[in-house]
Amino acid sequence: MQAASRESYRVGAERLDAYVRGTEPSAVASTADDILSVAAVLRREPRLRRALSDPARSGADRSGLLGDMLRGRIGADALDLVATLVSGRWSAPSELLDGVERLGVEALLASADLAGELGEVEDELFRFGQVAGGSADLSNALSDPMAPIERRAGLAGQLLSGKARPVTVRLVEAALAGFGGRSFSGALTRLVELAADRRDRQVAYVTVAAPLTEEEERRLGARLTEMYGREVSVKQTVDPDVLGGARVQVGSDLYDGTVLRRLNETRNALAKR
């Protein structure tokens, strides 16, 4: 987002934080669903996105237009939160869509946090990403932009039935819709990171040839926490192709101590002789 859009989103996020305090988790989750339903309408209706972000209109005019369209169709709390966003200045219509979508996701994460389930939601999102990425057929079925979102959401719902919390299922649906303009896998990764961030943690993606023991994972997490000055949430991926060692990615930092990397370096060095 550009500066004007970031400021408008910040105001909306602060309004959300104030709303969340003292509100029941189920009510926050319902409000989140309403906000995401508005995002879905904005995604389908480019003319509406332009009208609600038109700098030639006053903020009051734009929020009034929103109210005329949606009053009685979504909850009052959701309408108030989206109206707060719409009344701000947006650098582009697409950034308004991103802001509404992000606010809905943050509301879902807040509802899980209030219910004491945010850590579990974070883990469920990561595990589902691994399941989807582990099968080319499944990944293609979930990522196919030509397939109706309802069909792909139905498939994801079947896979997650009885295995994930309702908030996780709803977040997966947001990822299928292309949260933030990302691919399905990219959106899932971003959602994992947002969940961790709400718990004031950073995510470390660790690739190993064989699963780490609980003690090894604890030690690694402690070491990374010491390095980054913030609690680190370790997410393991097992890939026998790395042969041994570990590859660790935290944000843009990559630490590759795998046997595969060393073999590739040796092969490249020999090829240059």
Image (cartoon, grey):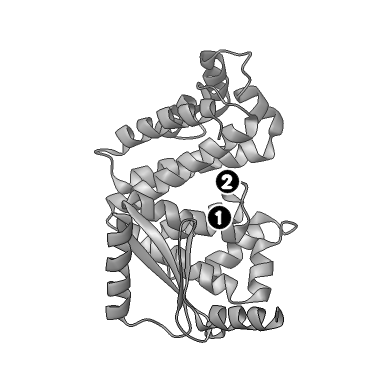
Cα separation, mark 2 vs mark 1, equals 7 Å
Name the residue rendered at 62%, 38% in the picture. 41
- Quadrant for the N terminus, please: top right
- Quadrant for the C terminus, please: bottom right
Q: Secondary structure at mark 2?
A: helix
Q: Residue tagged by mark 2?
A: 180
Instruction: Give the class, few, some or many, for how many residues have Cα within 10 Å of label 2's Cα (few <14, many ≥20).
Output: some
- Pinpoint residue 236: horizontal percent, then vertical percent: 43, 73
Above or below — where is 189 with respect to 240? above
- Which is nearer the eye, 15 or 162? 15
Name the residue rendered at 60%, 67% in the picture. 155
Q: In terms of sequence position, does the residue under pointer 2 or pointer 1 come before the other?
A: 2
- Pinpoint residue 61: horizontal percent, then vertical percent: 56, 14
Position of 55 compared to 240: left or right?
A: right
- Which is nearer the eye, 254 or 141? 254
Q: Residue tagged by mark 1?
A: 187
| Furthest-right residue in this view | 146
Instruction: Give the class, few, some or many, for how many residues have Cα within 10 Å of label 1's Cα (few <14, many ≥20).
Output: many
Type of the residue with mark 1: Ala
- Which is nearer the eye, 54 or 219? 219
Tag 2 and tag 1, C-beta contact below 8 Å: yes
- Pinpoint residue 215: horizontal percent, then vertical percent: 27, 79
Asked where in the image residue 241 lies, by quadrant, the reply is bottom right
Type of the residue with mark 2: Gly
Name the residue rendered at 71%, 28% in the picture. 47
Above or below — where is 214 with respect to 54? below
- Pinpoint residue 72: horizontal percent, then vertical percent: 49, 29
Residue 135 is tagged as: none
Residue 39 in sight from this viewpoint: yes
Name the residue rendered at 41%, 27% in the picture. 11
Asked where in the image residue 186 lies, by quadrant, the reply is bottom right
Residue 34 in sight from this viewpoint: no
